[in-house]
Image: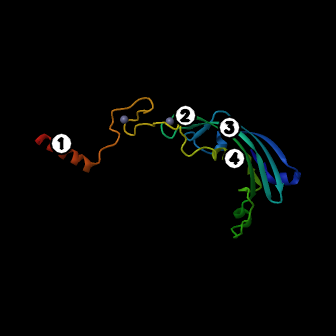
Amino acid sequence: MVVNIGRLKMAGEPLSLELAISNRDLALGPSVCTLNRPARAQVRLAVAGDAVRVAGAVKANLEVSCSRCLKPVDWSVNKEFDLEYHPDPVVNREGEEIELEFGDLTVGFYRNEQLDVGASVGEQIVLEIPMKPVCKESCEGLCDQCGQDLNEGSCSCSRRPLDPRLARLAELKLKMNRKQ
Ligand SMILES: [Zn+2]
Ligand SMILES: [Zn+2]
């Protein structure tokens, strides 16, 4: 959902929106995460000078992959946000160096008087996804040699390939034992 900031300035009053956020708004591949259904967001846009304040809340139910065993894991996001957007300084000032001084609010930029609010909310969802999600803390993951799911049972691969130097030592020990 792209909002025309010029028109918002002309209207002179805040705009309240109900948005359905789709997978496209997340700008991530389906291998990373997918929304089980479109996420619901309430957003209020208010203009102050050139700044646009985007505040609201979003609820999302996602499916992410366990970083160890790759099984799908449900992940829910329930987040409030308060963001401030400014005109993209490069586009509007043609490369002129300007000192950017903004307050504590998270700052983003909009270009050509347009702000994709769906993408802004999508970003807020993505920020809540852990870097390495796990299905459970004790997940054993997959065997890196045969791919066996170690939560379901062990495989016959040796867990740690023996260091070659240790292997020689073990061989030597075996020989010595035989001599005794
Ligand atoms: Zn797992
Ligand atoms: Zn294995």
Which residue occupies the foreground of this view, 43 or 67?
67
Residue identifier under label 3? 60
Whole-Å distance between the Cαs marked 3 and 1?
A: 60 Å
Sequence-earlier tag: 2 or 4:
2
Task: Point out the image quarter for the N terminus.
Answer: top right
Task: Indicate which label's residue lies in the foreground, 2 or 4.
Answer: 2
Query: Mark 4–mark 3 contact, CB under 8 Å?
Result: no
Whole-Å distance between the Cαs marked 1 and 4?
A: 65 Å
Whole-Å distance between the Cαs marked 2 and 4?
A: 24 Å
- The label shown at residue 174 is 1
**Crowdedness of circle 3 by 10 Å Cα count: few (<14), some, many (20+)?**
many
Whole-Å distance between the Cαs marked 4 and 3?
A: 14 Å
Pinpoint residue 177: horizontal percent, then vertical percent.
15, 41
Q: Secondary structure at mark 1?
A: helix
**Amino acid bearing label 1:** Leu
Whole-Å distance between the Cαs marked 2 and 1?
A: 47 Å
Query: Mark 2–mark 1 contact, CB under 8 Å?
Result: no
- The label shown at residue 145 is none
**Amino acid bearing label 4:** Ala
Whole-Å distance between the Cαs marked 3 and 2?
A: 16 Å
Sequence-earlier tag: 1 or 4:
4
